[in-house]
Image: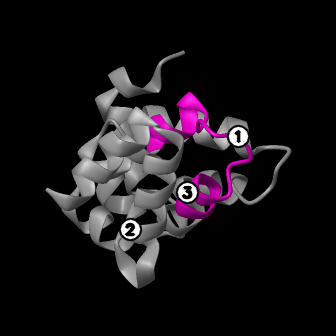
Amino acid sequence: MNLSFDHDFCDQVSKDIILYKIVELLKDSKYRAIGISILYQLTKSEHVRNALTLTECIPIVYQLLVHFPGPMIAPELISLCINLTNLKENCKVFALDGRFEKLFIRGLKNNDINLIKAIKNIVT
């Protein structure tokens, strides 16, 4: 089921506590993949991207990106990151406290074109 096509659902989620519960899934490795997949679909909505600015989502996603075990970041995770960086407020959070530099170094070191796309979103 693709949640991103149901705009009413996305709008409702952006106003509801369920969004915080989905973000909490990112903290538990057993449910992380499910949380990333759901958030990826939901972040196609600008309302949801705005609402996520008020959660722990961006710092958690940043940590997952920087500490990803392989050289190339999983497609679902980097797609979520790209969606999040389509909003200026979220980009500011990704750029705090030296975060941008770590992402930039990882992107160049691993020649990860998708991470470079997210970095481009952050700087523009």
Q: In the current view of this chain or complex, which residue is farthest to the right?
A: 30
Q: CA distance from mark 2 to mark 1?
A: 19 Å
Q: Main secondary structure of the magenta part?
A: helix
Q: CA distance from mark 3 to mark 1?
A: 16 Å
Q: Which residue is mark 1?
A: 70
Is disc 3 placed on a helix, strand or loop? helix
Is there CB contact under 8 Å for labels 2 and 1?
Answer: no
Q: Nearer the viewer, mark 3 or mark 1?
A: 1
Is there CB contact under 8 Å for labels 3 and 2?
Answer: no
Residue at 38% x, 27% y is: 4
Q: How packed is label 3: few (under 14 Cα within 10 Å), some, or many (20 or more)?
A: many
Q: Which residue is mark 3?
A: 61
Q: Give residue 100's mark.
A: 2
Disc nearer the start of the sequence (3/1): 3
Is there CB contact under 8 Å for labels 3 and 1?
Answer: no
In the displayed structure, 82 sits above or below 25; it is: above
Residue at 74% x, 47% y is: 69
Q: Callout 2, which amino acid?
A: Phe
Residue interval drawn in magenta: 61-80
Q: In the current view of this chain or complex, which residue is farthest to the front?
A: 109
Residue 51 in picture, x, y percent from top left: 36, 61
Residue 86 in picture, x, y percent from top left: 24, 48
Q: Callout 1, which amino acid?
A: Gly
Q: In this rendering, does residue 11 appear at all?
A: no
Q: In the current view of this chain or complex, which residue is farthest to the top?
A: 1
Is disc 1 placed on a helix, strand or loop? loop
Q: Nearer the viewer, residue 26 or 98?
A: 98
Disc nearer the start of the sequence (3/2): 3
Disc nearer the start of the sequence (2/1): 1
Residue at 40% x, 58% y is: 104
Q: Is residue 99 left or right of residue 38?
A: left
Q: Nearer the viewer, residue 60 or 38?
A: 60
